[in-house]
């Protein structure tokens, strides 16, 4: 069976983390990380750096031309990622990488839309907007990251195509009571549950079944498994908080909020996927 993957990697060269059943309460490194970033900027005499409300610091080297990039566009870019000690942990070599903004670390999701096609930006990313308390390769846990990114090209995602696929599926299968989230996720609340809805950053115990439009089941849990919503695909992050403990929801997830251009196992690239999820408990 496939377990949900944490889609925070730019491509396979960067660490991809799997959800697991044990979670530790993360420490707040925001003040520490901000001081590290400010010290780095001062020591290297970097001018023109701005701060986003999220805590991301950035320098627009070239704004590019045209409209700023919209989330979750499909982007082709060159980049270099390094630590504050200069260690390069990833970079494009001899070409560019392509990805959905919805499938990369939050620092990129926040920073890239500040420029347009042809633009270049330097990102100073606190650990909470990077890989957090996870470590891998040359990246220690709770690391501040720096990226230099140049956007070569952008194109609209598959949202319109996916939406029509979802609407056709709903109509063909006579599914009633389906609602649309502004993200593009369609969902049906089968049971609302009792009490407060699941928080967006909750750790949840769930039963679920995931299947393709042709009915092929690609993953299923008939006994409760535990996930942190922070570590799951966007469709789950958006859909599960629609219900409370004891609730059940059916999610019709467009590819940009699922596995996008990469796919996963039997899930082909750009696939719309469906999940039926029952929330047994959360914390």
Image (spheres, rainbow, N blue to C red):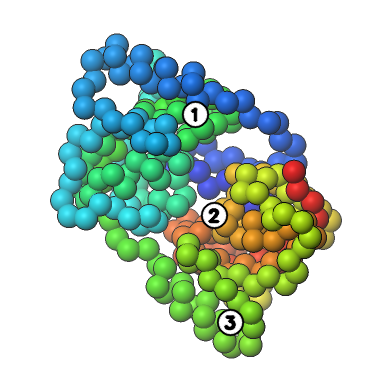
Residue for badge 3: 170
Residue 107 image point, x, y percent: 42, 38
- Counting residues from the start of the chain, the first of labels 3 and 1 encountered is 1
Give the quadrant of the N terminus: bottom right
- Mark 1 crowd level (few <14, some 14–19, many ≥20, 10 Å Cα): many
Compared to residue 28, the image places residue 246 above or below, namely below
Q: What residue is rendered at 39% in x and 56% in y?
A: 72
Give the quadrant of the C terminus: top right
Residue for badge 1: 127
Residue for badge 2: 234
Left-right relation of 80 to 161: left
Residue 64 image point, x, y percent: 17, 46
- Mark 2 crowd level (few <14, some 14–19, many ≥20, 10 Å Cα): many
The residue closer to the viewer here, 20 or 92, is 20
Compared to residue 92, the image places residue 253 above or below, namely below
Compared to residue 91, the image places residue 218 above or below, namely below
Is label 3 in a helix, a strand or a loop?
helix
**Which residue in the rendered view is the most extreme toward the left?**
65
Give the spatial CA distance, label 3 vs label 1.
40 Å
Is residue 187 at all visible to an observer of this figure?
yes
């Amino acid at each position: 069976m496939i377990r949900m993957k944490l889609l925070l990697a730019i491509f396979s060269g960067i660490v991809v983390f799997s959800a697991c059943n044990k979670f530790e309460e993360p420490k707040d490194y925001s003040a520490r990380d901000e001081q590290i970033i400010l010290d780095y900027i001062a020591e290297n005499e970097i001018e023109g750096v701005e701060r986003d409300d999220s805590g991301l610091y950035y320098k627009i080297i070239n704004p590019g031309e045209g409209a700023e990039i919209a989330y979750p566009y499909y982007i082709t870019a060159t980049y270099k990622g390094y630590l504050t000690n200069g260690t390069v942990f990833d970079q494009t070599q001899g070409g560019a990488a392509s990805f959905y903004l919805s499938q990369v670390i939050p620092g990129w999701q926040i920073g890239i839309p500040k420029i347009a096609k042809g633009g270049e930006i330097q990102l100073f990313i606190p650990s909470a907007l990077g890989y957090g308390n996870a470590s891998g390769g040359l990246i220690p846990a709770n690391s501040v990251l720096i990226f230099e990114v140049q956007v070569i090209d952008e194109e609209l995602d598959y949202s319109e195509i996916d939406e029509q696929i979802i609407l056709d599926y709903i109509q063909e299968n006579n599914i009633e009571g389906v609602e649309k989230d502004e993200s593009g996720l369609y969902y049906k609340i089968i049971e609302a549950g009792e009490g407060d809805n699941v928080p967006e950053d909750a750790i949840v115990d769930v039963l679920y079944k995931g299947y393709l439009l042709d009915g092929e089941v690609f993953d299923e849990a008939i006994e409760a498994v535990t996930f942190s919503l922070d570590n799951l695909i966007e469709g789950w992050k958006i859909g599960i908080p629609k219900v409370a403990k004891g609730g059940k929801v059916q999610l019709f997830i467009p590819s940009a909020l699922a596995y996008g251009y990469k796919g996963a196992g039997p899930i082909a690239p750009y696939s719309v996927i469906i999940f039926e999820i029952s929330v047994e408990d959360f914390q």
